[in-house]
Amino acid sequence: MANSKNGFFRGVAAGIAFSVAGILATGAFLHFYDGETSLQSAVMASSNTSEETIIDAELIGKLQALQELVDEDFLMEAEDAQAFKDGIYRGFMSALGDPYSCYYNEEELAQLQESTSGVYSGIGVIVSQDIQTGQIRITKVFEGCPGAEAGLLPEDILVEADGMDVTAMDLSTAVTYIKGEEGTFVTIKVYRSTINDYVELKVERRSIEVPTVEAEMLEDSLGYIVVSEFDSVTADQFVEAIEELKAQGMEGLIVDVRDNPGGLLDVVVEMLDYMLPEGKIVYTEDKYGKGETFTSDAEHVFDLPLVVLTNENSASASEIFAGAIKDYGTGTIVGTTTFGKGIVQRIYSLGDGTAVKLTVSRYFTPNGVCIHELGIEPDVEIELNEELRTAVTISHEEDNQLQKAIEVLNSKIEE
């Protein structure tokens, strides 16, 4: 697994469905901007300001010159005019040099919005992209889903989808070749380092309800909740799980956000509002020093011993959760340093069914710490045993990180 400081995630996407933004949502938490902005109006606005702008007369003139050259001398005709335009828009966003900012065509935007609902049509894996090498790696395979049934494993590197080379694609585009109509199949080629060879697998696409929250009671009345993502159904599932565990006599709780790429900001805020005393949960600042502050009230406070289990694939909203718990001192963080995704993306509609996602601000923990590219360091550090890194299913007894979390929680209960 990648170290959290080497910039591994480009964002995370759920091959479960597609997710341009992830299982959700780009490993980032997203705001949807509903304004009727259009590309043309954006250009006009930029031409009416005295500030330096990317889209200036020189750029527009050169684009026109390129168009004239293509029209006159280019040997072949563009088979798909819309795809040609989309390529220009993608190139513009790519030139910003920010792996989290991108362009969505109509189909991709619709799939992005679908991906936050908790129900997907895809193969049941989470993938991430190395922003330096471009490699797309499977970080999690959901048990009982098509990917697991076909034999995909964590740490597999995606190479092809239905014969299409995805090694040079951005994450958003690559995942669109994985997702498709329910009941159809996609042939996926991966590189598997454990055998130093390529593996080709035929995987069925199915409608999949993601288990965003799974809960159980362990021995010694210890509650255990796994949160695999933060989407629109997660907060209600999380609160319900805690209440059920309390009814069963829970004496302490482990919340596991390992391999959780993040999700929706309002969802993690709602969950932390249920857990924390009155006060600041997280706040954001844009390049003008402006932002939003999200707080908890005193209506609910979780007052039992608490451990949060993290790893290097815990990103964005997972880090908001772990960071707030750590800053308030209401729980102990166990595992490895989180990914370090401390920036905010926002979706802007372009008024024609398409949109762009832009990095607009940084977020800070309650104590004012911006963990971007740093991550949340655990209070108790423990690496997952090497032989477990490519396992789809790990028993509780084998899971040395979970066993350490249980040990820490029992010691807190005994205090």
Image (tube, rainbow, N blue to C red):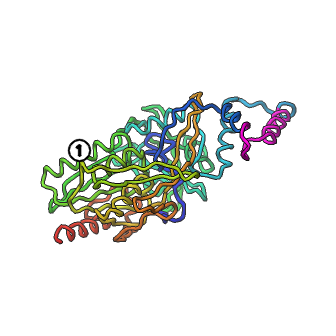
Q: Which residue is mark 1?
A: 240
Q: Is residue 132 left or right of residue 303?
A: right
**Residue depicted at 56% across the width and 37% down the height:** 348
Dot 1 surroundings within 10 Å: few (below 14), some, or many (20 or more)? some
Quarter of the image where one finds residue 108: top right
Amino acid type, mark 1: Glu
- Of 363 and 142, nearer the camera is 363
Q: Nearer the viewer, residue 119 or 320?
A: 320
Image side of residue 382 versus residue 175, left or right: left
Q: Secondary structure at mark 1?
A: helix
Q: Is residue 157 visible?
A: no
Residue located 57% across and 55% down the image: 135
- Percent x, y for residue 134? 59, 54
The x and y percentages for residue 318 are: 39, 54
In this view of the protein, can residue 123 be seen by the observer?
A: yes
Q: Position of residue 156 (x, y in %)?
A: 48, 55
Q: Is residue 255 magenta?
A: no
83 above or below 146?
Answer: above
Q: Is residue 153 left or right of residue 190?
A: left
The picture places residue 309, in percent across and down from the top left corner, at 33, 61
In the rendered image, the quadrant that contains the C terminus is: bottom left
**Numbered range of the magenta stretch:** 47-70
Above or below: residue 64 compared with residue 415: above
Name the residue rendered at 44%, 55% in the picture.
315
Tell me if residue 115 comes above or below residue 404 in the rendering: above
How many discs mark residues in the rendered view?
Answer: 1
